[in-house]
Amino acid sequence: MGADQRRTTVVALPGSIVAAAVSAGLGTGGWDVLDVRAERVGPDALHGPCVVVVEDDDGAARLRLPPGVPLHGTVALGTVRSADVLRHLQERGAAVLNQGAPLVPLLRLVDRRLHSPAGPPAGTELGRRHQEVLDLDRLTPAEHAVLRAMVAGIPAARIAERRHLSLHTVRSHIKSVLAKLQVTSQLEAVAVAHRSLPAAWLALAAVTFTSSGEDAPARTGEQ
C-alpha cells in the first residue's frame, strides 16, 4: 500500500450488495478497504474511519453493533426505514447518510465524511422521515397502488380505467391516502413517497421504459 493511501473499513451484513458497491467505489477512489461482513460486529471493527451499512438489501436494519462504543469517524448508511437506528448512531458520533441516494454522489459524500466526519445534525429530519414511514405503512394495498399511479403522474380517471374501478372509488382511495399521510394535496403525497418509500418501490417504474407514466406492475397482493 502506498504511503498516501487511506485505510477504511466497510462493515455490513453478509451478502450486502450496497456494501459491495460502496467498497468498490471507495477502492476506486484511492481507499484501501477492509471488508467486514457479519450480523454482529465487535468493537475492533469500528476503529478508525469506517462505513457501516445498517440494513440488508431488503431494507431491514439487522446489523448489530456493540453498545456504548463511540462512533466518531464512522459513516452510517441506511434509509428512512431505519431512521430510529440512524438517530441512535448519530447520538454516538456517527455521520449518517441516506443509502437510497444515487451511488456516485453518495460515494462522494461518504469520502468527504470519512475525511471530515462532522456533518449537519439530522436528528429532527430523521424523526420526521420516520413518521412518514409509519404513515406509509398504514396504507392498504389498494391505496399503495393508487399512490404509485400518482407518483407516475397518472390522473384519477386513467387510474380508474386501468384498475377497473369507478372514479368515485379511486377518488376515495386518494382522499384516504392524503389523510393517512397527513397532507392536503396529491403533490405533497408524491413528495412523501419520494422521500420515504423504499428505493425499490420507486425504482420499479423507473428501471423500465413506459409511455406517459403508465402503471408499473402491481405488487403482490395489490388489488
Image (cartoon, grey):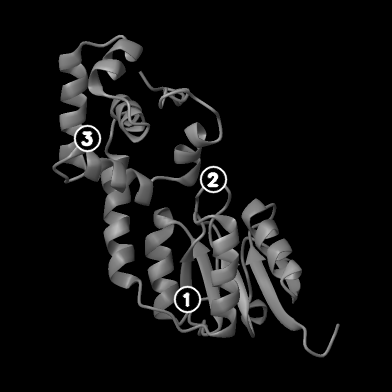
Q: Amino acid at mark 2?
A: Asp
Residue 210: give x, y in percent of width and height. Answer: 49, 25
Q: Is residue 138 above or below residue 162?
A: below
Q: Residues within 10 Å of mark 1 (few under 14, many from 20)?
A: many
Q: Give the label on residue 172, or none.
A: none
Q: Is residue 76 above or below residue 68?
A: above
Q: Is residue 102 above or below residue 177?
A: below
In the structure shown, which secondary structural element does the residue marked by tag 3 occupy? Answer: helix
- Residue drawn at x 69%, y 64% as measured from the top left: 25
All told, the count of numbered labels is: 3
Q: Residues within 10 Å of mark 2 (few under 14, many from 20)?
A: few
- Residue drawn at x 54%, y 78% as measured from the top left: 113
Residue 48: give x, y in percent of width and height. Answer: 64, 85
In-front residue for pair 191/210: 210
Residue 106: give x, y in percent of width and height. Answer: 55, 63
Residue topped by disc 1: 95
118 sits left or right of 5 in the view? left
Q: Earlier in the sequence, mark 1 or mark 3?
A: 1
- Residue drawn at x 70%, y 58% as measured from the top left: 20
Residue topped by disc 3: 177
Q: CA distance from mark 1 to mark 3?
A: 33 Å
In-front residue for pair 122/58: 122
Residue topped by disc 2: 58
Q: Is residue 79 above or below residue 11?
A: above
Residue 11: give x, y in percent of width and height. Answer: 64, 68
